[in-house]
């Protein structure tokens, strides 16, 4: 006995405190708490309202790039886009993984016509995203959103979510869930300005 408490009581109190601390820690992380919907959207925040079509979505110049560096420097090295697909995703997300080859193909097929694909990994470390990019041979720009600030700025409720932007950063469309190759091609053909 320790004071009025038995060792067993102290052990139970300690276990309860540890469990409470773990639950508190998990509530403040980006560990998935939902499940994928039938549409393939992995719901993270069911109360999110989404960014409005016509709003402007801005990526901060100092946003980290998965392979090192910052967005402003990486963007300066690329031709000016005519249409941008922002993909909010996570490497652990099965619908996001399913969509990765579609986005890779879009970037390769339409890059010369002015399409720019930018993946923004939500809540993950740069090293994790860089390894994912290497494994899947992604040739498009990947940014990391460790604290989910861009995810919240987009008002996204789940992943994958795509923001389709014009050259000035105005939102033309918001697409939730994974894109099929056919739907992605139709979308780009419809929205990519002709020369």
Image (cartoon, rainbow, N blue to C red):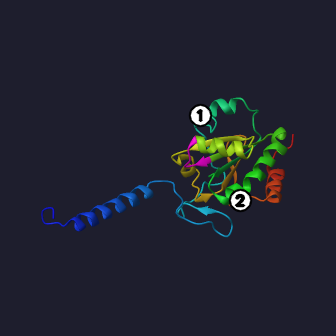
How many C-alpha atoms fall within 10 Å of the one at disc 2: few (<14), some, or many (≥20)? Answer: many
Q: In the visual, does 115 lie left or right of 24?
A: right
Is 124 in the magenta? yes
How many C-alpha atoms fall within 10 Å of the one at disc 1: few (<14), some, or many (≥20)? Answer: few
Element at label 1: loop
- The reply to whether discs 2 and 1 touch (Cβ–Cβ < 8 Å) is no
Instruction: Name the residue located 69 percent from the left edge and 43 percent from the top edge.
Output: 133
Q: Tag 1 or tag 2, which sits nearer the N-term? A: 1
Give the residue pinned by disc 2.
178
Instruction: Name the residue located 55 percent from the left edge and 65 percent from the top edge.
Output: 34
Label 2 vs label 1, nearer the camera = 2
Give the residue pinned by disc 1.
61
Give the number of the disc on residue 13: none
The stretch of residues the image draws in magenta is 121-126
Element at label 2: loop
Is 191 in the magenta? no
- Residue 146 visible in rendering: yes
Distance between mark 2 and mark 1 Cα atoms: 27 Å
Instruction: Name the residue located 67 percent from the left edge and 70 percent from the top edge.
Output: 38
User: In the image, residue 49 lies at what x, y percent?
Assistant: 56, 60
Q: In the visual, does 15 lie left or right of 1?
A: right
Nearer to me, 15 or 187: 15
Which image quadrant is residue 176 in? bottom right
Nearer to me, 171 or 25: 25
- Residue 175 visible in rendering: no
Q: In the visual, does 174 lie left or right of 33?
A: right
User: In the image, residue 103 lies at what x, y percent?
Assistant: 76, 50
């Amino acid at each position: 006995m320790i004071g009025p408490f038995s060792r067993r009581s102290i052990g139970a109190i300690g276990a309860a405190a540890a469990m409470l601390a773990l639950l508190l820690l998990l509530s403040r992380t980006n560990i998935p708490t939902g499940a994928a919907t039938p549409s393939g959207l992995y719901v993270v925040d069911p109360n999110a309202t989404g960014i409005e079509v016509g709003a402007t979505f801005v990526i901060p110049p100092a946003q980290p790039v998965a392979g090192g560096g910052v967005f402003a420097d990486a963007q300066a090295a690329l031709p000016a886009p005519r249409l941008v697909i922002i993909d909010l995703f996570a490497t652990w997300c099965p619908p996001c993984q399913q969509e990765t080859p579609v986005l890779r193909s879009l970037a390769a097929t339409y890059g010369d016509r002015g399409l720019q694909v930018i993946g923004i990994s939500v809540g993950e470390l740069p090293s994790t995203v860089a390894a994912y990019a290497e494994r899947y041979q992604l040739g498009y720009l990947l940014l990391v959103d460790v604290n989910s600030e861009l995810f919240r700025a987009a008002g996204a409720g789940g992943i994958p979510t795509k923001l389709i932007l014009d050259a000035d950063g105005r939102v033309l469309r918001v697409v939730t869930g994974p894109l099929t190759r056919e739907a992605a091609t139709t979308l780009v053909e419809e929205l990519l300005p002709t020369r």
